[in-house]
Image: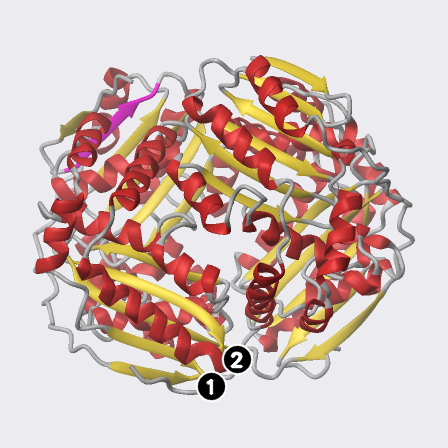
Amino acid sequence: MQFIHHTLSNGLQIVAECNPEAHSTALGFFVQTGARDESADVAGVSHFLEHMVFKGTPTRSPDDVNREFDEMGAHYNAFTSEENTVYYAAVLPEYQTRAAELLGDIMRPSLRETDFTTEKKVIIEEIRMYADQPPFGADDRVKARHFGSHPLGKSVLGTVDSIAALPLDKMRSYFQRRYSPGNMTLVGAGRIDFDQLVQTVEKLCGSWENLAAGRDTPRADGHSGFECVLKDTAAMEYVIQITNAPGATDDDRFAAKLLATIVGDDSGSRLFWELVDPGLAEHASFSHHDYQGSGLFMTYMSCEPGKTAENLKRLRRVYADLQAGGVTATELAQAKSKINSRVVLGSEKPRGRLFTVGGNWVNRREYHTVADDLALVDAVTVEQIAAVLASYPLADSTGIAIGPLAEVS
Amino acid sequence: MTQEILAHTFANGLTLVAEPIASLESAALSILVPAGCAYDPEDRNGLAAVMCELSLRGSGERDSRQFVRDLENLGVERGDSTSAAHVSYSAATLARNCLPALEILADLVRRPHLPGDQLEAVRNVVLQELQAIEDEPSQKVMLELRKRQHPDAWGRNSQGSRPDVEAITLSDVKRFHAQWVQPRGMILGVAGRIDWPSLKDRVGELFGDWTASAALPEPPSKIRQPRVEHIPHESNQTQISIAYDSVPYRDPDYFQAWGAVGVLSGGMSSRLFTEVREKRGLCYTVYASYHTLRDRGAVLCYAGTSAERAQETLDVTLAELRRLKHGIEPGELDRLKARIKSALIMQQESSSARSGAVARDWYHLGRVRTLAELSAIVDELTCESINSYLGENPPRDFMIVTLGQQALSA
């Protein structure tokens, strides 16, 4: 296992964890752009653009792009988050160059008007699909309330109106600024011929012009409050609560991850025993999400509407107990063993390692082996978790309930 | 790539089937207990799921907290599910913890306490899952489709129905466990970094002295009647689902039929994705998937779109299904083969995927198809072979279920 990185003269970075024993090769372009980089008049453009990237280049039609990925038997996809847009493909090692060429080429899409018009319909269907599914947009709404004017309060999908109103030229100028090579990293994991990879990328991407594509990463203030939104066609009541948490470059993010595992993992956690095991909630989880400059803890619960008030009371009690007494050494040891095993299992596939290696590099310009990450998890103490709880009190949450209830006491 | 499949059937009917994969750090277990919801009594649909959930609440020497704690200390990623044929338990962890995890799962399968004081909590868990389906229209329409495609016990939703789940008593659960959870036909699939002799010995110690109970009849089959049905539902989108008959995994023609579905819906260059989404922008999600039971198969298709575009989406999707009988093209076959080859190799990177695959193969075939055998089958697929299958077995007699504001015509 060897980690290598190289930067092209235009700023494009190439990093790879090369494992000659691997059966496959995973490659991904990480573009540091997402909802947080959008102004209000282009809400949802990052995600829409992600779809448009598959719509062809000067030398490839949309059908060519899909066909060529399938000809390699690639496992490929893309996703957009608040701060990253990632395009990835896992292929057999013999296809490394072909996959890198295809991924590299589509990073300079034609953005044709006819494709834009057709794809707009698909995006609107995607938004409508989520509008029919829990939590029915409540996640965007509670984040907007919590973050206020902070960039992390923006919706990844945008709205039907913002997408319908988006003109192609605004997408083009957003693309120009954000898909600058200095804002992009090609990440590799698995069986990689690194010299060959650099050669391929240099030839294809070396002439891209580097433009400044910065980003503000202020710490979020965080607001609090609770609202209840009526959705009378829903069968269940859904509750989301968020509070501030350590961000992607904070040292206490490992303590935050362990806290989240202890409190809200899908089995054996405090919320599991308090709400799920007794059959009071269909789902109850507590998770940590880190971003550049800020982070959040999110509680997500769904239950039969009649059980909502009682469950909220139980949630408050769980959080008050944690705030007062912290976590126990036994809980911490159990959480470490869970994470340890998950990290190892998740790292067996190159397409699993890709996202860890890429995330570490994009956020912190660092490389960690699996063992490095496990050592950091192992070093977390009960006191460090108590310090996280003290810095980020769980009671200061912004919450929303959505479902058949008009109000929740 | 060399691959070894090892299997042993114990005197009581339990089969251990394993694939050692030395390149992995992990090992995974998959236990198929032939006690799925197809065996629920007529008026107790949901019983297998309740039994499964209740079995997690204490077994052997452990109460439910100790059970969870011990598995978590071993770093076990655990899962359970109920299908028509099986209640399944799975576990994946670091290789050295595999046998200790198996010991805990042996208690879970053989010696669950099935505690009466937990029955209400379990009932609530299952009832909440049932209710949550009402908020997931795409999931709901596929469950409704399956019920109609297989009108007998094999099309059931494992969570059952509210009145049945409300009526389940502790003695129902205990009787079901006594009748159906037994070693005959049970399959334990294991894959990853394992040592076969010690695995086989340990499985023998843990399960060998268990005796099978009397065999019970399989649920009777019923013939489906193809039709178009609409379920009114308040939502933005209309959910469209279509099913047609196909052959099961064990059928000699399976790979021809499966290949044709791959052309329809595998990768973004597939016919459904291209015609429905890429060319016309009709929907975000559209797919066809292969669903196989032991003695029959079906192809299940789905598309979800806004009400005003639903009729066109259904029309285009059906046109693609009907067009299949005119055959597939060489480029489509090449892409199909590339995808299968790559999927077969990448499956070797996951102990969980392989433990599930060897157990399922054993259920369907009574043996495991090796990667070499699968590669040879795939190499032999030709346009002529698939087209001749499609000529004789064109997609037809569609079962169509839609969910949304307005009915569609087909």
Which residue was labeled with disc 1?
B405
On the image, the x and y values in percent for residue A161 come to: 71, 73
Check disc 1 and report its element: helix, strand or loop: loop
- Evaluate if marks 2 and 1 touch, with contact meaning CB atoms under 8 Å apart: yes
Characterize the local packing of mark 1: few (<14), some (14-19) or many (20 or more) Cα atoms within 10 angstroms: some
Which residue was labeled with disc 2?
B235
Q: Amino acid at mark 2?
A: Ser
On the image, the x and y values in percent for residue A94 come to: 41, 22
Sequence order check: which comes first, mark 2 or mark 1?
2
**Residue depicted at 92% across the width and 53% down the height:** A221
Describe the colour scheme in one phrase.
secondary structure
On the image, the x and y values in percent for residue B92 come to: 42, 33
**Residue depicted at 45% across the width and 50% down the height:** A63
Q: Is residue B350 above or below residue B226?
A: above
Could you tell me which chain the residue with mark 1 belongs to? B
Q: Is residue B79 above or below residue B29?
A: below
Characterize the local packing of mark 2: few (<14), some (14-19) or many (20 or more) Cα atoms within 10 angstroms: many
Check disc 2 and report its element: helix, strand or loop: loop
- Classify residue A340 by image quadrant: top right
Q: Amino acid at mark 1?
A: Gln
B190 lies left or right of B56 = left
Q: Which residues are magenta?
A: B14-21
In this rendered view, identify the residue nearer to me: A310 or A227: A227
Q: Is residue B44 visible?
A: no
Screen quadrant of the C terminus of chain B: bottom left
Helix, strand or loop: magenta stretch = strand
In this rendered view, identify the residue nearer to me: B2 or A14: A14
Labels 2 and 1 share a subunit: yes
Q: CA distance from mark 2 to mark 1?
A: 7 Å
B140 lies left or right of A189 = left
Q: Is residue B112 above or below residue A333?
A: below
Whether residue B375 appears in magenta in the rendering, the answer is no
